[in-house]
Amino acid sequence: MRTITSLGAVWPAARRTSPKLILFVAVIVAMGPPASAASSAPSTTSLHVSIDPRVELFSIIYRLAGFLYHGEDRAASHYETEVENHFGRHREHPAVALAIRLKENYHVDYGVQLSLAVHVDDAANLHLRVPLAPWPETLHERWTPALIDEFLAQARDFATQADFAGFVESQSPFYGETSARAEAALQAGVHLDWFDSFFGPQSGREFRVFISPLGGLNCFAFWIPSDGGVEAMAVIGVWRLDERGRPVFRQEPRLASFVVHEFAHSYVNPTAEPYLDQLAEPVNRIKPFLVGHFAAAYQQEEHSALVRESLVRAAVIRYCHERRGFVSGRRALSQELKNGAFWMPQLLDTVERYEAQRDRYPEFQDYMPEVVEFFEAYSSRIKSKAAVARASLPLYTALIGLYTMVAWLPSRRWPTPKTATRWDRVVRFGLLYAVLCPAFEYFALGNRPSLPLLLTGAVLLLAATLMVRRSRSARSGTASSGPPDETASPRSGGPRHLPASLQLSYLLVVIGAPVFLSARIAWALSAIAVLGMLLQARASKASAMVPDGSGRDLPAPQ
């Protein structure tokens, strides 16, 4: 009752408020970050950013082997020039020849090399930090104990012969400057406390970021059990240089998202491991339908890679939503859809249900049976979804034809006397876009909204178009003794026009739908537009009619 009373008190004021202002406030509120993002407390866990000598030693050997160049059209960085000047004469060293043989015969590429680099103690000794039995989780399986012993022995000799320690000492100012730049860019964008809040608390976890000046666009994730818990490591390459050829790191969402992505692997991979056997069959049913980046990267890989990557990317989207706001989360989702992760919206729905039931699922590990059930259900419908997607083009054509028949053809019988303006075209295009955007999301991607909601929204929008076309202007009911207006519609009794509120409303739909990439938001904006139009039309009609004392309403005098 209290809610009804408060709404009753607000409603008269709301009716006097401009519909344009209501729409503007509603969109601003929807686009704003959630309260948790604005008031999130700083993380108590520190982020360690550095250039690690182990990574650099392995990267230099790999570069001398010819496998870490970034193209002829890219100028060498300051650091690449220093590496070439110092180590170029050691290309014939047996360590470089061994790196070439490992690449050609065993497919030991850059990421596989780095998986060994982070498992040794330091660049001087190159001794393994952990035993090989059981096999370390992030030490790539392309290594064997014999290959590890051979490569580490050659790498020690290379470091001695090429004076790697002297090179590291000479580059210490560059290492310090680069690490400081990266740390300043990451501290504001990476909230480490989010990981415990999302996946469940884990004590004794360390987060380390190793900047790789030779790594280019490559990023990798590794983690090793430590005395206190887990040491999570993210190796991040450098893809932007300043005028001096030195690395530049901007405080941009992209860089922070890469780091969050790599750290999330240290949570997701161990969590998903016990359930990979159950996920093999459903994921293998999805793989033949992969497109885009996911087809190129995961169609030939084991099913475990697709599972882990899907869950990590879903976690990153949730991170963007919670820490940067709704729009950032929708943009992250849009990027994953472009990459070909067409199952991501429904997987996000599953993850959101986990977040809403944290009392029942304290940790993400507890929710994994529900994730398995999601992949089972989704993969069982993948063939029908693919068939609908293939039929989407003729379906779009039919929708456009239906729209033309219902919205444009009535104007042939009831012509609008006024010349179509730019705003008229914006409204028509906005209406068409608001219909087709959810249609694309449903028919092509097999995602929300549901079919009843889609049809209801289409009927609502088309009805709004007809209502606008048949609306009377304030002067259409004016009493006149002269001849009738030849341009007036025989059905409506006068010329029709498009209310300004509808113009603004559908302009917001045109702008907002691709930004949000959410059919539910598109329909919400459309519904607000229709309600605003109805309120304005009702007010216009009331002001245009006055009682004549006999119980009949006459047009207001002009």
Image: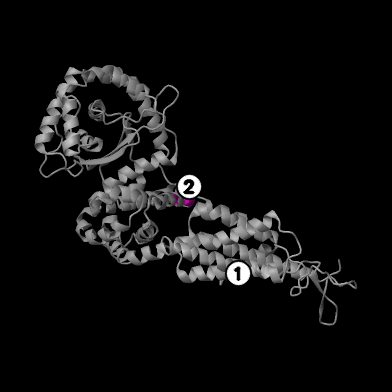
Residue plotted at (40% across, 42% down) = 42
- Circle 1 residue: 405
**Nearer the observer, 81 or 541:** 81
In the rendered image, the vertical position of residue 204 relative to residue 343, given as above or below: above
Figure label count: 2
Give the magenta-colored segment's residue range.
325-329
Residue 119 appears at what percent x and percent y? Answer: 19, 35
Magenta region, main secondary structure: helix
Asked if one can make out residue 231 in the rendered structure from this viewpoint, the answer is no
In the rendered image, the vertical position of residue 35 relative to residue 228, given as above or below: below
Amino acid on which the number 2 mark rests in the picture: Ala
Quarter of the image for residue 459 reads bottom right
Query: Which residue is the extreme one toward the bottom?
Result: 550
Residue 97 appears at what percent x and percent y? Answer: 17, 27
Horizontally, residue 68 falls left or right of residue 16, namely left
**Nearer the observer, 151 or 126:** 151
Amino acid on which the number 1 mark rests in the picture: Met
